[in-house]
Amino acid sequence: MSRCPCHRSPLPARRGFTLIEVVAALVIFSLGVLMVIRLTTTLERQMRYSATESELVVRAEERLDSLDALDFDSITVGTTTVGLTVQGTSYDRIVAITPVTGVLYRIDVTLSPATAGAGPTYSTTSYRAAIW
C-alpha cells in the first residue's frame, strides 16, 4: 500500500542548527576566548615581576661579591646609596656596612624602587671577617 503525499509528517526533518543555537555557541566561545586573554595578561605581569626580582637578586649578589673581593682593611664602614635601573624601573641600592666586632663586619644590601610601590624590593645580609 502506498502512502498518499498529503499524509506527510507535520514536522520536516531537521537539517543544521537554528539561529539560537549558533548565537549560544558563539557566546560560549567568546567567553572562553576572553578568559584566555585575561589569563595571558596575568601571566605576563607575573613573569615580568619575577624577572625583576631575579635581576634584583643578581645585582645584590654582585655587590656582595665585589665587597668580598676587597681586603678587609679597605672596606669602608658606613652607608652608600647608588641609583640604578632594573627592567625600566629606577631603584636605589643601599649598602650598609656596620662593624660587629673589630674583625667582623655586617653587610646589608637593599634594592628598593625609587618610587614607592613601583616594583619589588630585595634585601640580603652577609658578614665579612678579617683574616687572622
Image: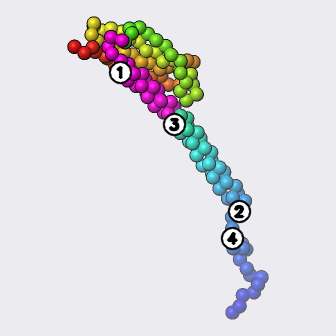
Q: In the figure, 31 relative to 81: above or below? A: below
Read off the residue under disc 3: 47
Q: The residue tagged with tag 4: helix, strand or loop?
A: loop
Choose top left, top right, bottom left or bottom right for residue 103: top left
Which class describes the residues within 10 Å of circle 2: few (<14), some (14-19), or many (20+)?
Answer: few
Q: Which mark is residue 18?
A: 2
Q: Residue at x 38, y 19 (%)?
A: 67
Q: The residue tagged with tag 3: helix, strand or loop?
A: helix
Residue 43 at x, y percent in the picture: 53, 39
Tag nearer the camera, 4 or 1: 1
Q: How is the image coloured?
A: rainbow
Tag nearer the camera, 3 or 1: 1
Quadrant where the N terminus sits is bottom right
Three-letter code, disc 2: Thr
Q: Residue at x 53, y 21 (%)?
A: 84
How far is disc 3 from disc 1 in space, using C-alphas?
33 Å
Which class describes the residues within 10 Å of circle 4: few (<14), some (14-19), or many (20+)?
Answer: few
CB-based contact (under 8 Å), mark 2 and mark 3: no
How far is disc 1 from disc 2 in space, using C-alphas?
77 Å
User: Over which residues does the magenta segment extend?
Assistant: 49-74
Read off the residue under disc 1: 69
CB-based contact (under 8 Å), mark 3 and mark 4: no
CB-based contact (under 8 Å), mark 4 and mark 1: no
Residue 16 at x, y percent in the picture: 69, 68
Q: Residue at x 55, y 38 (%)?
A: 44
Three-letter code, disc 1: Ala
Q: The residue tagged with tag 2: helix, strand or loop?
A: loop
Q: Which mark is residue 14?
A: 4
